[in-house]
Image (cartoon, rainbow, N blue to C red):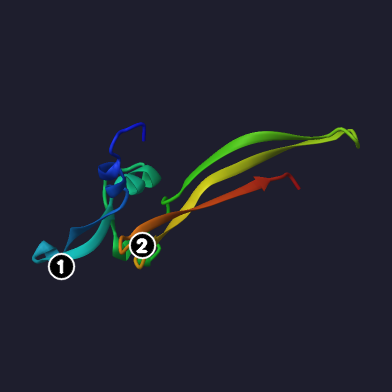
Amino acid sequence: YQGVDMSKWWASILIESKEFEYGPSGMRRYEVDAYNGWLIQFCTMDWKSIKASQLRLGEIKSLCCLNHCPMKIVDRINDCSDSSVLIAGIVGFQIHVDSPNGVQAVQATHGWAMLLPE
């Protein structure tokens, strides 16, 4: 981007790492798979990594980046209007392990919805 090497920045989008979990009474610790990187930090608004087991069990509820905006819908032909809310953003992501160049790839899933009164 504008002559700047961005490879380190893109390489830190999603980092596979390890975290520790402790057994009963904290006597023994186990190393478990986890994820970190700026995508995780941006989507969770937290600096902590996420354990792979938390993702599998659906324990991570805040892993999405959504924005909302009030919107007024106007129909000038029928002379009517209504209020709504537009919600849009990244609703998740997919990790592609078997990409053509052999490097893991992250694909964001974008979505939007319009909320209307009944």
**Residue 117, horizontal then vertical, whole percent:** 73, 44
Q: Earlier in the sequence, mark 1 or mark 2?
A: 1
78 displayed left or right of 99: right
75 displayed left or right of 73: right
Q: Is residue 37 visible?
A: yes
Q: Residue at x 23, y 63 (%)?
A: 33
Where is mark 1, residue-wise?
24
The amino acid on which the numbered mark 1 sits, given as a three-letter code, is Pro
Residue situated in front as seen by the camera: 104 or 23: 104
The amino acid on which the numbered mark 2 sits, given as a three-letter code, is Leu
Q: Secondary structure at mark 1?
A: helix
Circle 2 residues within 10 Å: few <14, some 14–19, many ≥20: some
Instruction: Please tell me whether mark 1 or mark 2 is closer to you in this view.
Output: 2
Q: Residue at x 37, y 43 (%)?
A: 42
Q: Secondary structure at mark 2?
A: helix
Q: Is residue 60 visible?
A: no
102 displayed left or right of 32: right
Where is mark 2, residue-wise?
55
Q: Residue pushed farthest right?
A: 78
- Vertical order, 56 against 19 (above or below): below
Q: What is the distance, in whole Å, between disc 1 and disc 2 at their CAs?
A: 22 Å
Residue situated in front as seen by the camera: 84 or 24: 84
- Vertical order, 8 against 70 (above or below): below
Q: Are marks 1 and 2 in contact (CB under 8 Å)?
A: no
Q: Residue pushed farthest front?
A: 3
**Residue 31, horizontal then vertical, whole percent:** 16, 64
**Residue 82, horizontal then vertical, whole percent:** 78, 37
Quarter of the view holding residue 72: top right
Which corner quadrant holds the N terminus? top left
- Vertical order, 67 against 31 (above or below): above
Circle 1 residues within 10 Å: few <14, some 14–19, many ≥20: few
Q: Residue at x 38, y 63 (%)?
A: 96
